[in-house]
Image: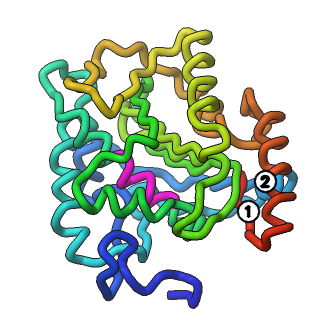
Amino acid sequence: MSANQPRTCIFCGGSPVTREHVLPESWRDKVGFPAVPRKFIQRYKGDENTRTESPRLFDVVVRRVCKKCNETWMQALDTRVVDVVLNPDDATKTCDPIQFRRWAIKVAIMRSTLDHSGIIPREDRMQLYAGEDVSEWRIFVGRVDYPHLRDTFAGTGGHFPDDGPMEGLIQVSWCVGTTLVICLREGQATKNHLSEGFKDFCRGNGNNFAEVLPDAQTFPALSSLIPLRLNQLRTYFWFFSTDPVSPVRDQMTTIQATIRRRNIKQGYPEYGS
């Protein structure tokens, strides 16, 4: 463990932390086909590209949580959603929408810490650990037309102290089989404006996403959603980034530059992709 990585659990504060999978390794065989090696692309400050071999999806692990958290409430969330995530075409499969939101937020937080330690507000982690929903997260679900394994972190903004406001936007996306999940967390400055722009883009392009809202009573019927083609995934996975495929690349570049200037003055590092 490197010196700058936390030595206590990001949820309960317990120790020691252990190697935990972002997505359950036990799901590997249930998906029905092996994950293949892929390239991970990181864009920093809008103009630097780094390509490295990324772990296979079910091999992605982080040292951010303790064994107790992983084997209790975190594992329970995985169990509550596994049937609907791995069987989106089965209309009889469903789950509690709030538990699905909590599961998605849990995965998004774990995946975020893989690349950018400390960017998730402490209050988000504490609410999740307390068994609550975190309404600031926007959770979207969809389908793809062919089974696929992929995950990405994209975002524009800056690091912040645990008791400070979040800046910019975090996007964490993954596809397991034919189920697609996109999680968005905006800071105070843009407060849902960017997320609403994402929804408008989806509607304008005829793509059928369903948002799982904090006050939802029933989970969306995934079998009724129009599947995305695999060649459309990159645009959605890198939507809130400075990647050339992003339809809001210029806006993200401007936001990132503005926050960077502010952070330089205050001595905070920024993140960006």
Q: Secondary structure at mark 2?
A: helix
Residue 37 visible at all? yes
Residue at coordinates 87% horizontally, 52% vertically from top-left? Answer: 47
Q: Residues within 10 Å of mark 1 (few under 14, many from 20)?
A: many
The tag earlier along the polypeptide, 1 or 2, is: 2
Is residue 137 covered in magenta? no
Q: Residue 180: percent from the left, percent from the top?
A: 42, 34
Q: Residue 221's x, y, as percent?
A: 26, 19
Marks 1/2 in contact by CB < 8 Å: the verdict is yes
Prevailing secondary structure class for the magenta stretch in the rendered image: helix
Q: Which residue is mark 2?
A: 259
Q: Amino acid at mark 2?
A: Ile
Q: State left or right for residue 13 relative to residue 184.
A: left
In front: label 1 or label 2: 2
**Residue 82 percent coordinates (x, y):** 21, 43
Coloration mode: rainbow
Figure check: 142 above or below 203: below
Q: Which residues are magenta?
A: 104-112
In the displayed structure, 1 sits above or below 79; it is below
Q: What residue is drawn where x is 21% and y is 51%? A: 77
Tell me where residue 140 appears, x and y as whole percent.
43, 31
Q: Residue at x 65, y 48 (%)?
A: 155
106 in the magenta segment: yes
Residue that label 1 marks: 270
Left or right: 100, with 166 as reference point:
left
